[in-house]
């Protein structure tokens, strides 16, 4: 629950949304003006020929945080992302990027913002078909007016970063899906943005490649430490990557919390159903199942961090003879993990509800 | 079912409407007889009356009254002419364009202003180097040989006249086409307004523009250029809109997120992404420009087209073939150049030395020097007369036309009885009865047929549109001629459609065959339309048969192409499903593939109709008696502008009526089949 405390040292949120609405349709603005505040009734709007894309979204994202937006198809994830990148204008509400009012920006400021602080990765890769890998990656630099030589140099660094050395002169059509998405990632990072948007970046890839790309993403993030908005409809992916998860349904953010909290304390019935089948070892941290230290016990030599996800250490813990000591970030022993607890989490599901 | 009922009603009315000249059921009164006159009056007013202003005339040294419109058109005309001549002189040597700026006396006082033409050897070398630079050895070889042919056969000068014409027209078409295309893409109402205009412009026969253009712009290369631009721009606009619309919205978003400004988004993201379609547009522009050269020759454009027209008129098949080959070569080479240029890749890494960087230029200069040296030697060798190593004049070049002519003569002698028998049979037992049937059709029945078809396919809306288009023709004096045109086109379309679908279906069975047949279609489509007339005249002389066959050959291309494409786009899962359930190949083709491909094939038939009509009208060039012949006749008549335009509009309306029917049908059918 306190897992992302270390992220919020910066007082100013990087992204701040206040009651953001996006409603499609000719008369959306008037229609919205009729209702005062709060969540609007999508049914009533639909009868008036308006489609509700985002319904009263308010949240903050702090520097270096990975916020994952989840939901079924049509739940408004992409629309929310497009509002925050202003690819589409929000119908109502306020969006602040680093304290600046996004909706009040003119074209020039917006272009400036995108050139300096934003990068985006698309599900369909959206590479320019007539440009090579290198040219695609250098493209955001070139439109900025960086000289050819410098932009090519920078783009080569990016090619290396995503591991596409030797393929820089290929055309997108000559690459596999995973490779194309690496290009998309490299392009979005070429201008060294602070905020990184990814809209279902790995959904078009097959499961093996997807896993590989997720690892790649985590590796990049550990080096780059960007503020990230990541859209997916794959809960496993969300659990692997998230600091916090926002679950959307029909344009409404049903719950926005840490993975463990979402699984353990679903805010609504919808979230509850959504997370029902989620294996708890994938969300629970050691901390939530450890026992107080009892000095009479013999400990094994293995030591695990209290922030580790159970799944990641389960195998090692279970192959030990003795209970495993749990350490905090200062390497002090703060608890002890009994194998029986791990087994309970792994196999005891269904017999009892998670303890609240 | 519905169509059966329609056919019965049609036949019934056909039989029972009396053939009397006074009955309105038989023929409508020519209420729109005056229509050409109105156009003439309009043009007349524009050119000679409207908004006259005083203009200083430097020759007569006095003020003169001239209408504004005329000043504008004449200014445009001279600007275009200036550029055309300039391009010509650049290659052929001379300095008249400079003389135009200064004066003739200035020119004769400064002889150095004249520059000599490049020796033809240097031109061939230049073409090859350009080809190599753009793509590689293959294009170098093709362009070297192609341009070599032009030079050696003494066609360089007319070729260059044509080329300069294309080099001026094509960029103008490109800019206009792209500009309007972008505008249409950005603005829905502009697109809606452009669509019918483009349809009309594209389906009007080439000839019908000529007189109005001549009235507005005078006679000469510039008038030819204007007519060409009008004809060649629409496909560019259309393909630009099509291409831009196909760009995926994600790519547009990606461009925006990369920080593109509006213009960067347009020029660096949208247009390059749409480049496949835009390039097809460029290709079409080049083809249309070349196709217009013969037509433009009627209003004074010089070049291959003019020579071809003369050769065709005097039935010199050998010469016509040689010239036709020139046009084809220019078309193919320009096409390959433009494609290669657009696909050229940049190299960011190689660190080139000065020599490597400027290798092509240095090579060209060196080769030019060698070429001059050669021509100097030539001057010593060919003491008096023509220096063939420098320049091969028109009509003095190498030629194989005597052989071709001899071959043709032999062919005629050997096969005349058979060809003639076929010819006579076709004309007397097919064409003439068919024509009589068309002419014997009461106007009432015609309307039942076309409006009925429109109603069945697209409801009241289609029926009204088609009826309106046809009514316009029916109210003129030219209804009978229009019927003749329609009969020729129908015949050509029927045969082409059957041929195209059969050939296309057979080739579509096999991937390799499909690819081959599609490239064959590509190749033949680079031929300007009138080229097809040459070989058929050779075989059948100047008869309706020739025109028919040319029209069939030309119109079979789209039918074949769309059949192959349509069949190939049937999902393979359906093939397999069919095979699994044990149907034979023929059954599969009949019951699965063809029905699914039919909407696409019909779009091909739509093109076939347009192509066939174009050719039928072109047939007037060698003498037929339909609308085309009247359009040709109007070229030399007083007040021909109005008649030419009106007749052109008639042909366009016939195309549009068919177009409306087929497009609506294909759309409905696709919706019903759930493919889009
Ligand atoms: N341009 C538009 N015009 C009208 N309605 C739209 C538009 N774009 C999206 N919508 C609607 O807004 C809703 C949310 O769409 P959105 O694309 O944000 O969903 P999503 O969660 O990203 O789904 P997916 O997982 O399929 O990408 C949908 O009902 C959609 O139909
Ligand atoms: Mg989406």
Image (cartoon, grey):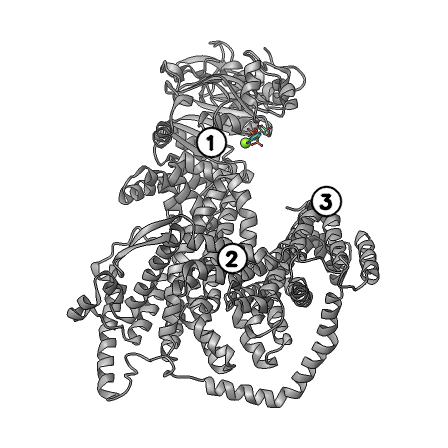
* Residue nearest the viewer, comparing B107 with A194: B107
- The picture quadrant where one finds residue A303 is top left
C-alpha gap between disc 3 and disc 1: 50 Å
Question: Would residue B273 be found to the left or right of residue B626 on screen?
Answer: left
Secondary structure beneath dot 1 equals: strand
Q: Residue furthest left?
A: B109
Question: Would residue B61 be found to the left or right of residue A96 on screen?
Answer: left
Q: Is the residue at mark 2 in contact range of ligand 1, meaning its CB lies under 8 Å from it?
A: no
Identify the residue at horizontal 59%, vertical 10% (top origin): A356
Chain hosting mark 2: B
* Residue nearest the viewer, comparing A235 with A16: A16
Numbered tag placed on residue B40 in the rendering: 2
Q: Are marks 3 and 1 in contact (CB under 8 Å)?
A: no
Give the answer, above or below, for where A100 lies relative to A125. Answer: above
Identify the residue at horizontal 60%, vertical 60% (top origin): B610
**Quarter of image, ligand 2:** top right
Identify the residue at horizontal 21%, vertical 64% (top origin): B103
Chain hosting mark 1: A
Secondary structure beneath dot 2 equals: helix
Does residue A239 show up?
no
C-alpha gap between disc 2 and disc 1: 64 Å
Q: Nearer the viewer, mark 2 or mark 3?
A: 2
- What residue sits right under mark 3 in the picture? B460
Secondary structure beneath dot 3 equals: helix
- What residue sits right under mark 1 in the picture? A198
């Amino acid at each position: 629950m306190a897992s992302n405390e270390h992220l919020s040292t910066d007082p100013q949120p990087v992204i701040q949304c206040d009651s953001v609405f996006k409603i499609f349709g000719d008369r959306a603005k008037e229609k919205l003006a009729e209702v005062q505040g709060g969540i609007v009734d999508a049914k009533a709007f639909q009868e008036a020929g308006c489609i509700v894309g985002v319904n009263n979204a308010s949240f903050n994202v702090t520097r270096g945080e990975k916020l994952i937006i989840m939901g079924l198809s049509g739940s408004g994830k992409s629309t929310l992302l497009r509002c925050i990148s202003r690819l589409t204008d929000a119908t109502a509400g306020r969006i602040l990027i680093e304290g600046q009012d996004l909706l009040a920006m003119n074209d020039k400021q917006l272009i400036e913002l995108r050139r300096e602080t934003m990068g985006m990765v698309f599900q369909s890769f959206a590479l320019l078909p007539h440009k090579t890998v290198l040219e695609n990656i250098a493209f955001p630099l070139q439109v900025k007016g960086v000289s050819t030589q410098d932009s090519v140099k920078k783009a080569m660094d990016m090619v290396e970063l995503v591991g596409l050395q030797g393929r820089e002169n290929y055309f997108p059509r000559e690459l596999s899906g995973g490779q194309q998405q690496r290009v998309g990632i490299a392009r979005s990072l070429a201008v060294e943005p602070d905020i990184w948007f990814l809209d279902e970046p790995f959904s078009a890839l097959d499961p093996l490649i997807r896993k590989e790309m997720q690892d790649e993403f985590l590796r990049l993030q550990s080096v780059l430490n960007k503020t990230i908005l990541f859209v997916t409809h794959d809960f496993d992916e969300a659990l692997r990557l998230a600091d916090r998860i926002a679950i959307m349904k029909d344009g409404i953010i049903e719950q926005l919390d840490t993975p463990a909290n979402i699984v353990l304390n679903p805010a609504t019935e919808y979230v509850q159903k959504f997370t029902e089948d989620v294996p708890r070892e994938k969300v629970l941290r050691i901390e939530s199942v450890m026992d107080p230290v009892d000095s009479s016990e013999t400990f094994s030599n293995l030591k695990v961090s209290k922030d580790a996800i159970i799944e990641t250490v389960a195998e090692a813990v279970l192959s030990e003879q003795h209970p495993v000591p749990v350490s905090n970030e200062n390497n002090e022993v703060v608890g002890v993990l009994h194998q029986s607890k791990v087994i309970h989490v792994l196999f005891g599901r269904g017999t009892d509800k998670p303890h609240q | 079912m519905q169509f059966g009922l329609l056919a019965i009603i049609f036949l019934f009315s056909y039989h029972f409407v009396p053939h009397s000249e006074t009955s309105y059921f038989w023929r409508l009164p020519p209420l729109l007889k005056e229509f050409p006159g109105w156009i003439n009056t309009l043009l007349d007013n524009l050119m000679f009356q409207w908004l006259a202003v005083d203009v200083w005339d430097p020759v007569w040294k006095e003020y003169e009254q001239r209408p504004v419109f005329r000043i504008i058109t004449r200014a445009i005309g001279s600007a275009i002419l200036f550029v055309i001549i300039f391009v010509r002189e650049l290659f052929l040597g001379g300095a008249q364009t400079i003389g135009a700026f200064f004066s003739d006396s200035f020119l004769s006082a400064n002889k150095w202003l004249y520059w000599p033409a490049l020796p033809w050897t240097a031109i061939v070398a230049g073409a090859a180097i350009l080809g190599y630079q753009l793509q590689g050895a293959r294009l170098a070889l093709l362009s070297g040989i192609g341009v070599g042919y032009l030079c050696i056969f003494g066609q360089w000068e007319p070729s260059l006249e044509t080329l300069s014409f294309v080099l001026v027209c094509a960029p103008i078409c490109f800019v206009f086409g792209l500009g309007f295309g972008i505008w249409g893409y950005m603005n829905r109402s502009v697109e809606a307004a452009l669509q019918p205009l483009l349809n009309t412009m594209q389906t009007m026969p080439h000839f019908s523009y000529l007189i109005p253009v001549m009235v507005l712009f005078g006679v000469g290369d510039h008038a030819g250029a204007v007519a060409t631009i009008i004809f060649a721009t629409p496909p560019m606009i259309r393909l630009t809109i099509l291409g831009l619309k196909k760009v995926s919205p994600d790519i547009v978003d990606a461009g925006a997120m990369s920080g593109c400004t509006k213009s960067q988004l347009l020029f660096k993201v949208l247009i390059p992404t749409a480049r496949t379609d835009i390039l097809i547009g460029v290709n079409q522009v080049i083809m249309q420009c070349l196709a217009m050269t013969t037509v433009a020759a009627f209003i004074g454009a010089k070049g291959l087209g003019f020579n071809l027209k003369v050769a065709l008129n005097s039935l010199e098949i050998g010469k016509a073939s040689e010239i036709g080959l020139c046009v084809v070569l220019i078309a193919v080479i320009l096409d390959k150049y433009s494609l290669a240029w657009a696909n050229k890749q940049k190299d960011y890494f190689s660190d080139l030395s000065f020599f490597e960087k400027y290798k092509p230029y240095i090579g060209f200069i060196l080769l030019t020097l060698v070429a001059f040296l050669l021509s100097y030697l030539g001057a010593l060798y060919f003491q008096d007369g023509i220096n063939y190593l420098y320049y091969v004049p028109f009509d003095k070049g190498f030629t194989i036309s005597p052989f071709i002519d001899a071959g043709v003569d032999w062919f005629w002698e050997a096969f005349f009885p058979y060809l003639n028998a076929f010819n006579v049979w076709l004309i007397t037992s097919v064409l003439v009865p068919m024509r009589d049937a068309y002419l014997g059709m009461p106007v009432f029945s015609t309307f039942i047929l076309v409006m009925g078809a429109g109603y069945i396919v697209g409801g009241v809306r289609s029926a009204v549109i088609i009826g309106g288009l046809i009514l316009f023709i029916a109210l003129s004096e030219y209804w009978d001629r229009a019927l003749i045109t329609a009969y020729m086109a129908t015949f050509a379309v029927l045969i082409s459609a059957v041929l195209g679908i059969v050939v296309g279906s057979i080739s579509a069975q096999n991937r390799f065959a499909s690819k081959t047949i599609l490239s064959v279609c590509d190749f033949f489509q680079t031929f300007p339309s009138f080229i097809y007339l040459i070989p058929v005249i050779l075989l059948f002389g100047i008869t309706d048969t020739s025109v028919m066959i040319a029209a069939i050959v030309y119109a079979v291309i789209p039918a074949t192409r769309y059949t192959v494409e349509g069949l190939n786009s049937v999902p393979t899962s359906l093939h397999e499903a069919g095979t699994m359930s044990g149907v034979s190949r023929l059954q599969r083709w009949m019951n699965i593939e063809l029905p699914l491909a039919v909407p696409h094939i019909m779009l091909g038939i739509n093109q076939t109709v347009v192509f066939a009509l174009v050719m039928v009208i072109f047939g007037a060039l060698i003498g037929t008696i339909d609308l085309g012949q009247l359009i040709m006749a109007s070229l030399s008549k007083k007040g021909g502008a109005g008649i030419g335009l009106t007749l052109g509009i008639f042909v366009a309306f016939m195309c549009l009526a068919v177009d409306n029917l087929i497009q609506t049908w294909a759309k409905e059918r696709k919706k019903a089949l759930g493919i889009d």
